[in-house]
Image (tube, grey):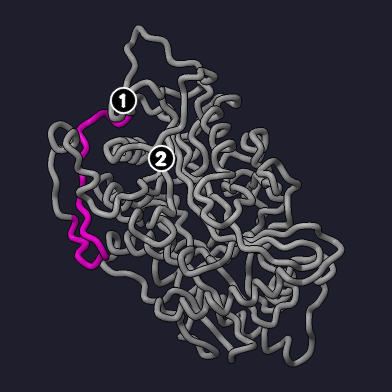
């Protein structure tokens, strides 16, 4: 998961063998749909100094600020004279953290991943995000590496992470499309006192064995993904190989007049747009090809959009006392429309220097785009003439709306991940200034792919490596 460079440098373990804290940000604990679940007896009696109302009366569930009195690095402690467990010990196992242990994890990760929030609000956000789409209803699972012989709330948390169950599609060379599951791994973290001992490696190896059969229901799990902020080698060596490309375009904020060729997208529009988008994605995935044996995509559904937007809502309420009404922009008539769904991401305080807050375009759709299959033979299917000029105008209007939104909401960049060949071509023709970036260290989309029997598989073509799928 993308984090600001200064935070990454401060948080990463210096050991190349036993790296640390991975790449991803804390979300929350599965099943914490009410604050009461987190205020267990131990927390109420000994570790909370006070509970104060958060003031977020508009949120769907009441959450509160928690003031934690433990040491920032308190993850449970071994005796000073005791040896740390060997990372290869048979006594180590994956478990799910208790609510108390979740609060400890969040408190420890705050220094690296608190972004624009103070600690009480960061804890509020962590609780709140357990109630939102993609995370709720057991969509998110939390994991810790611990000594299986020690009781909950008394065991050192050697390492932690979380996973999200994602709806995915795969298709083969003849265009047969199947619905399945991909698990997204996020928030890999090892507290400073436990680093350089191999615990993250052990945890990831245990996950690799567990996830192929985790939460399957009637669907097959075809892989697990993560977004590395520590380059390509560390997770690649563990079996999560980097996608061949991890590119994005960066645009600068620009104050602009109100849309003349289109209109803002509001939250009430999202469900219908996502349904239309999924129909087009399924059609693209069903295209027969002799060039690619297998394709995979994370479905750009409403749950993915709302996960990002709910995180945006929380930070915006804290920073501005209100939420951005525009969730994107759209231009053109149905069948020829261009639209973008976006999110505001504040990585630090508004007065911080340097600032690196971003308006991410979660998903960009050009309905007439035949290159959206991402197949090599379709890369040159770029229509010309009056229709092309019209589509360029629509895309330009949508991107300028994104630039204006960034300027209004004090964001420093607009980023568009993985544009299609047609979109790249039209942006060049539009004359909008931009920079092309190929990421080598941060937000590296990486996948471990499973065959029919759950064993390793050749990496498929990853279609739509866009920001909506990031965690």
The reply to whether residue 435 is in sight is: no
Magenta stretch contains residue 254: no
For mark 2, give the secondary structure: helix
Seen at 57% across and 47% down, the residue is: 227
Q: Which residue bears the numbered disc 2?
A: 112
What whole-number distance in Å separates the C-alpha atoms at marks 2 and 1?
Answer: 28 Å
Residue 302 image offset from top left, x and y in percent: 47, 69
114 left or right of 462?
left
Seen at 65% across and 81% down, the residue is: 367
Reply above or below: 56 against 1: below
Reply above or below: 323 against 412: below
| Dot 1 crowding, Cα within 10 Å, few <14, some 14–19, many 20+ | few
Q: Nearer the viewer, residue 127 or 2?
A: 127
Secondary structure that dominates the magenta span: loop
Seen at 63% across and 47% down, the residue is: 446
Chain part drawn in magenta: 54-73
State the mark number for residue 59. Answer: none
Residue 36 image offset from top left, x and y in percent: 20, 49
The reply to whether residue 113 is in sight is: yes
Reply above or below: 81 against 218: above
For mark 1, give the secondary structure: loop
State the mark number for residue 151. Answer: 1
58 left or right of 325?
left
């Amino acid at each position: 998961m993308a984090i600001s460079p200064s935070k990454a440098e401060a948080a990463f373990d210096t050991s190349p063998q036993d790296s640390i804290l991975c790449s991803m940000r804390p979300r929350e604990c599965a099943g914490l749909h009410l604050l009461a679940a987190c205020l267990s007896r131990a927390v109420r009696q000994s570790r909370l100094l006070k509970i104060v109302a958060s003031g977020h009366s508009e949120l769907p569930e009441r959450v509160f600020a928690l003031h934690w009195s433990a040491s920032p690095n308190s993850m449970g402690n071994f005796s000073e004279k005791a040896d740390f467990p060997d990372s290869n010990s048979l006594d180590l196992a994956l478990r799910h953290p208790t609510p108390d242990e979740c609060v400890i994890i969040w408190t420890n990760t705050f220094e690296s991943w608190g972004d624009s929030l103070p600690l009480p609000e960061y804890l509020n956000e962590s609780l709140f995000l357990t109630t939102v789409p993609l995370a709720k209803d057991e969509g998110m699972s939390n994991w810790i590496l611990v000594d299986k012989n020690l009781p909950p709330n008394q065991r050192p948390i050697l390492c932690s992470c979380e996973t999200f169950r994602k709806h995915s599609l795969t298709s083969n060379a003849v265009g047969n499309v199947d619905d399945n599951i991909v698990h997204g791994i996020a928030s890999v973290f090892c507290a400073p006192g436990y680093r350089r001992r191999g615990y993250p490696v052990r945890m990831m190896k245990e996950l690799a064995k567990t996830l192929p059969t985790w939460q399957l229901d009637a669907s097959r799990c075809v892989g697990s993904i993560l977004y590395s902020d520590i380059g390509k080698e560390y997770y690649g060596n563990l079996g999560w190989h980097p996608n061949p490309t991890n590119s994005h375009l960066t645009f600068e904020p620009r104050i602009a007049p109100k849309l003349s060729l289109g209109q803002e997208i509001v939250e009430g529009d999202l469900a219908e747009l996502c349904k239309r988008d999924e129909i087009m994605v399924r059609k693209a995935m069903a295209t027969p090809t002799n060039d690619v044996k297998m394709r995979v995509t994370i479905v750009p559904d409403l749950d993915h959009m709302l996960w990002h937007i709910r995180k945006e809502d929380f930070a915006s309420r804290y920073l501005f006392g209100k939420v951005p009404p525009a969730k994107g922009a759209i231009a053109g008539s149905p069948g020829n429309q261009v639209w973008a769904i976006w999110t505001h991401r504040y990585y630090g305080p508004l007065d911080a220097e340097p600032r690196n807050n971003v308006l991410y375009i979660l998903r960009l759709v050009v309905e007439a785009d035949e290159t959206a299959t991402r197949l090599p033979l379709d890369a040159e299917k770029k229509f010309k003439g009056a229709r092309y000029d019209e589509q360029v105008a629509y895309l330009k209007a949508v991107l300028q709306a994104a630039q204006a939104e960034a300027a209004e909401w004090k964001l420093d960049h607009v980023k568009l991940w993985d544009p299609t060949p047609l979109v790249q071509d039209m942006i060049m023709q539009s004359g909008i200034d931009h920079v092309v970036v190929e990421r080598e260290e941060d937000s590296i989309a990486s996948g471990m792919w499973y065959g029919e029997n759950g064993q390793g598989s050749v990496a498929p073509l990853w279609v739509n490596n866009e920001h909506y799928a990031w965690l």
